[in-house]
Image (cartoon, grey):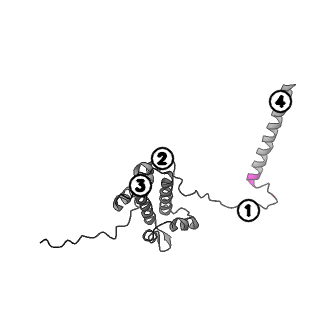
Amino acid sequence: MFQRLLIIALFIVVAILLVRTIANWFNRGGWIGRGQSEIKGSWAVVEPLGRLGKAAQNTLKSSLKLEDEEDVQKVAVLFDVAHRTVRNLPLDADELRILADGASEPVRAVLYRDKAVHAPGWLLFAADRVQDVHPDMYAYEAKRLTLTAYREVFPSDGETVLPPERTLAPVAYGTPP
């Protein structure tokens, strides 16, 4: 008796799978539609910012000496913005505006150039975040570490460089007595 029930259940499951497979096959060909009300188009999947993978996050932790997961995620998001800018991948303008609001005024001035996203500006923003985590680190050290980590995470973006420091100038020493 129990075997008969199992065999009947097996036939029912196979029949359901067969019907679904045939329906999906017809639907893929466009023969069956929901009253022709479906909109066909090309959809693009936009990955959320900051999903770099475990190896990249470990690189950020070790290279930039970041211990807090929140700091790692913030820097990963900024690296991802710079990478997508270099590769001309889609970016959400509202999300960028929210990120830019968190930048200091001098950094915010270099995030965009001619209303276009400027990748080195976003790397400067990441260096600023690193310096916020390590206030004892000099600015040039934070920038060097940030650019090195960025090139480790995205080796194909080797041409990306940070703009030169504007405040560097020869120090004027007075004449010795």
Q: Secondary structure at mark 1?
A: loop
Q: What residue is rendered at 53% in x and 56% in y?
A: 50
- Residue that badge 2 annotates: 55
Disc 4 target residue = 7
Give the residue number, with chain letter if any, for mark 3: 151
- In percent of width and height, residue 102 lies at 50, 65
Is mark 3 in CB contact (under 8 Å) with mark 1?
Answer: no
What amino acid is found at the position of numbered circle 2 in the picture?
A: Ala
Instruction: List the residue tagged with mark 1.
Output: 39
**For the C terminus, which image quadrant?**
bottom left
Mark 3: give few (<14), some (14-19) or many (20+) Cα within 10 Å: some
What percent of the width, then of the height, locates residue 164? Answer: 35, 67
Q: Which residues are magenta?
A: 27-42
Q: Is residue 164 left or right of residue 117?
A: left
Which mark is in front, 3 or 4?
A: 3
Q: Amino acid at mark 1?
A: Ile
Mark 1 in CB contact with mark 4 (< 8 angstroms):
no
CA separation in Å, label 2 and label 3: 14 Å
